Image: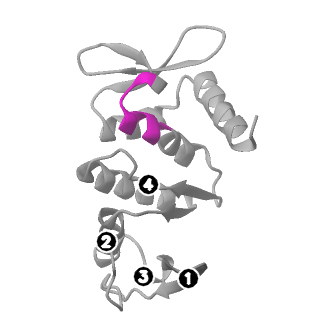
Amino acid sequence: MPEHLEQFHDLILDAHAEGTNKSVQDLFSNLFPGAIESMGAGLPEIVYRDPTGFITEIESAGSGTVSSFPIVAGVHYVKTGGTLIIEEPEAHLEPARQLKLIEELVAIAKVKKIDLIFTTHSDYVIKKLLALVSRKKIKHTDLGLYSFNRSDSLTQIEKIAVDKTGEAEQTLNLS
């Protein structure tokens, strides 16, 4: 089994052993109607209960729910002072949930003193991070934006400076 799958399995086991950590449940409920719960004895079963009371295994829930669960759980289980790398947190989420997820993750990261690294194709995620700088929720020096530009077989990485007001000091190509 690949290491990342073993780690995800361990995350599920930990969540189950702790009765699905309350902070994980709270964050999840802030993002989605309904709740995640741990059910049954023996092998862990994490389920999603929708607002009508219908219960389904987490992996059978909607794609936004499925893709967000490891992010929501991961941010709570990363150790203080650690780093959480999240590939495309916007995957399968409509813009409003993308914005809410980023805001919640940043707030938790500040409290836990953890670093977050995102890869994203979402202009909503980038604009939200810049807005958090402008609202002084993130220091401009704590936000690193990088652009990866590919031409032929060469990829160039360019750092994009952000000023104190949350403005990128060059035009962003967010398409």
State yes or no: residue 44 in magenta.
no
Disc 1/disc 4 C-alpha distance (Å): 25 Å
Q: Are marks 1 and 4 in contact (CB under 8 Å)?
A: no
In which quadrant is the N terminus drawn? Answer: top right
Tag 3's secondary structure?
helix
Residue kind at label 2, given as amino acid type:
Ser
Residue indicated by mark 3:
140
Residue indicated by mark 1:
157
Tag 1's secondary structure?
strand
Q: What's drawn in magenta, residue-wise?
A: 60-69
Residue kind at label 4, given as amino acid type:
Leu
Q: Is residue 124 above or below residue 11?
A: below
Residue kind at label 3, given as amino acid type:
His
Disc 1/disc 3 C-alpha distance (Å): 19 Å
Q: Quadrant of residue 51?
A: top left
Residue indicated by mark 4:
105
Q: Nearer the viewer, residue 1 or 135?
A: 1
Disc 3/disc 4 C-alpha distance (Å): 17 Å
Disc 4/disc 2 C-alpha distance (Å): 24 Å
Q: Earlier in the sequence, mark 1 or mark 4?
A: 4
